[in-house]
Image: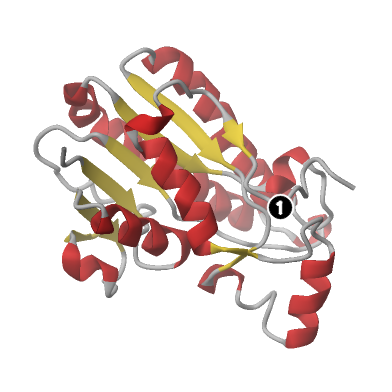
Amino acid sequence: MTKKYVVVGGSKGIGAALLRGLIAEGNDVISISRSVSDESSSATFIEYDVTSVEDFPDVEGSIDGVAYCPGSINLKPFHRLTQDEFMADLSVNFLGAVKTIQALLPNLKQSGSASIVLFSTVAVQTGMGFHASIAAAKGAVEGLTRSLAAEFAPSIRVNCIAPSLTDTPLASRLISTPEKREALAARNPLNKIGTADEVAAMAKFLLSGDSAWITGQILHVDGGMGSLK
């Protein structure tokens, strides 16, 4: 049976990989992002920046799931972080998710068994230096996940994925040389950097009916970094 999904931030990285996976299964997918991508050619594309003051675009009809994928990586010593930088990370990671869910909630309620997938980071659970701004913003996402899972049950499930470093355009500056890539991979128990497809596979599972017994969870797709030494 064809399902209808909305992927926000589907033009790059994990969002683009998720878009490919959902389309490959024959689903009806709406991609909402600031720029079009090759994956968007097989989806209904809506250009929109979630951090703008403009109202969220109208989406008609029932929606079976939404994935909010936009994120940021702003790593600095705490004393160098400005209030504006904290607000920028909060805006794209947390407030954008709030705006999206509030706008699409009537559509999700029409489904009767919808799913919401959000994204955090391993740095919320595992304290990491220079991650104060992004960990704080993603910590808010994790709190939102659990609160909404309780509030929306049983008709809408809400879960969150917390990856470690993943090979995406967002992380390109951190893995820009073979030496950086090797050093960062060595920090992971599985001795590798995750791929967008690996994280997107979990998101696709959480959107599908195969995860009908899962809600309110923070799932660590992180190569073991959050729990192993």
Q: x, y (%) of residue 35? A: 30, 70
Q: x, y (%) of residue 113? A: 27, 23
Q: x, y (%) of residue 49? A: 32, 58
Asked where in the image residue 164 lies, by quadrant, the reply is bottom right
Residue at the image point whose x is 40% and y is 46% from the top: 204
- Name the amino acid type tagged 1: Gly
Identify the element where label 1 is drawn. Answer: loop
- Whether residue 49 is visible here, answered yes or no, is no
Packing grade of label 1 (10 A; few <14, some 14-19, many >=20) is some
- Whether residue 14 is visible here, answered yes or no, is yes
In the rendered image, the quadrant that contains the N terminus is: top left
* View extreme (right): residue: 229
Residue at the image point whose x is 29% and y is 73% from the top: 37
Query: In the image, is residue 102 above or below residue 167?
Result: above
Left or right position of 132 against 9: right
Residue where numbered disc 1 is placed: 223
Left or right position of 186 against 103: right
Asked where in the image residue 217 lies, by quadrant, the reply is top right
Residue at the image point whose x is 81% and y is 55% from the top: 189
Q: x, y (%) of residue 173? A: 65, 78
